[in-house]
Image (cartoon, helix red, strand yellow):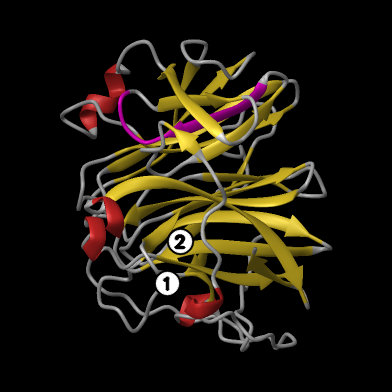
């Protein structure tokens, strides 16, 4: 995405610092096998095992019984949704975010064209989470070329107070957050504020996207991808994080720099043949929190691959294990 620059400011609050890992400390991805060409992966746990949704082909779906072997099992939608063509001429949809709340499965996803912020975030629901079972509920939030942000890369947060929030954003002026109505999953009927969470002031294109917010021990952690995706072995993606006492921010990195001023503590970056990790999501599983992401394999001509690692927590900050 290639937007014009805009400088953002926010209040600075100091948190205790922690030392980020260096690239030499990063572990390799956990063992996964099968069909691993998943871009912008979102992992969901169901009664039958694991469902992995990713970008393209009406939202690709893979299944796994053990979180190791992943097999392609169809697509979320049986046909391209009519409204998607208003945002992507090929009918392509991207970056799904899947979760289970209030007795059903929820999926937020994006429709756009590469390099454009004429974009929309849609919502679909399902009783099972299985491919072909998803019913589209329509557009949650949209942007035009007149807007200063980009409605793609959605992520749902249900906080400890039961409030629903949707973070999203890609390039332009960075990451945004809106409140949702828990009854419908759509925009909140009275709270229409669009909060600013993160940007890259030092980069004229504001290369930050793919937000994912998780709550842990009373703090909120905003994971994002910095720099450039989708260039094979030339990709420069890396996963960064900041934390806040409130879902709406301000999010600060381990050095106390606000993410609205370019802050971010590195969680995972290129190492060995693992190039450009990003497009991440986080899943709480029985053995701990999982960081789920894609990367480009330098040993396979830059092909994109699924990566899964456990996340440890040290001094209040995540560390890939």
Magenta: main secondary structure equals strand
Task: State how far apart marks 2 and 1 are (Cα).
Answer: 6 Å
Q: Is residue 300 above or below residue 78?
A: below
- Residue at left 60%, top 83%? 11
Q: Give the magenta part as a residue range.
A: 49-57
Please tell me how crowded label 2 is: few (under 14), some (14-19), or many (20+) other residues with Cα within 10 Å.
many
Question: Which residue bears the numbered disc 1?
Answer: 199
Residue 73's tag is: none
Which one is nearer the viewer's eye here, 104 or 315?
A: 315
Q: Which quadrant would the C terminus be assigned to in this image?
A: bottom right
Residue 53 included in the magenta stretch of the image: yes
Q: Position of residue 236 (x, y in %)?
A: 31, 68
Question: Which residue bears the numbered disc 2?
Answer: 175
For residue 253, say whether it is visible: yes
- Residue at left 60%, top 31%? 185
Specify which label sits upstream in the sequence, 2 or 1: 2
Q: Exactly how many numbered labels are in the figure?
A: 2
- Residue at left 32%, top 18%? 81
Is residue 128 shown left or right of residue 86? right
Q: Is residue 137 above or below residue 109?
A: above
Q: Position of residue 297 (x, y in %)?
A: 33, 54
Q: Position of residue 126 (x, y in %)?
A: 58, 16
Q: Position of residue 27 (x, y in %)?
A: 56, 65
SS under mark 2: strand
Which one is nearer the viewer's eye here, 32 or 8?
A: 32
Q: Are marks 2 and 1 in contact (CB under 8 Å)?
A: yes
Residue 294 included in the magenta stretch of the image: no
Which one is nearer the viewer's eye here, 45 or 180?
A: 45
Is residue 288 shown left or right of residue 204? right
Which one is nearer the viewer's eye here, 304 or 228?
A: 304
């Amino acid at each position: 995405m290639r937007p014009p620059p805009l400088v953002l400011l926010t209040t600075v609050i100091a948190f205790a610092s922690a030392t980020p890992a260096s690239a030499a400390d990063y572990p390799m991805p956990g063992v996964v096998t099968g069909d691993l060409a998943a871009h912008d992966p979102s992992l969901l746990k169901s009664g039958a095992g694991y469902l992995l949704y990713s970008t393209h082909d009406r939202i690709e779906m893979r299944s796994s019984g053990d979180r190791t072997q992943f097999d392609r099992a169809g697509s979320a939608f049986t046909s391209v949704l009519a409204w998607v063509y208003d945002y992507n001429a090929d009918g392509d949809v991207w970056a799904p975010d899947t979760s289970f709340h209030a007795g059903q499965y929820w999926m937020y996803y994006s429709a756009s064209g590469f390099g454009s912020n004429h974009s929309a975030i849609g919502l679909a629901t399902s009783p099972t989470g299985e491919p072909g079972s998803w019913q589209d509920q329509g557009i949650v939030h949209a942007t035009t070329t007149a807007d200063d942000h980009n409605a793609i890369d959605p992520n749902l947060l249900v906080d400890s107070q039961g409030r629903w929030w949707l973070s999203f954003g890609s390039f332009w002026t960075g990451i945004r957050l809106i409140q949702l109505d828990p009854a419908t999953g759509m925009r909140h009927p009275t709270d229409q504020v669009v909060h600013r969470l993160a940007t890259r002031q030092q980069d004229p294109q504001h290369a930050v996207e793919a937000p994912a917010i998780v709550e842990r021990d009373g703090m909120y952690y905003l994971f994002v991808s910095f720099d450039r995706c989708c260039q094979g072995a030339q990709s420069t993606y890396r996963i960064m994080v900041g934390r806040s006492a409130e879902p709406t921010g301000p999010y600060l990195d381990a050095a106390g720099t606000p993410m609205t001023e370019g802050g971010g503590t590195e969680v995972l970056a290129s190492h060995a043949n693992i190039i450009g990790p990003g497009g991440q999501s986080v899943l709480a599983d029985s053995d701990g929190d999982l960081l789920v992401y894609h990367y480009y394999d330098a040993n396979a001509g830059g092909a994109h691959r699924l990566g899964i690692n456990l996340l440890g927590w040290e001094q209040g900050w995540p560390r890939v294990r």
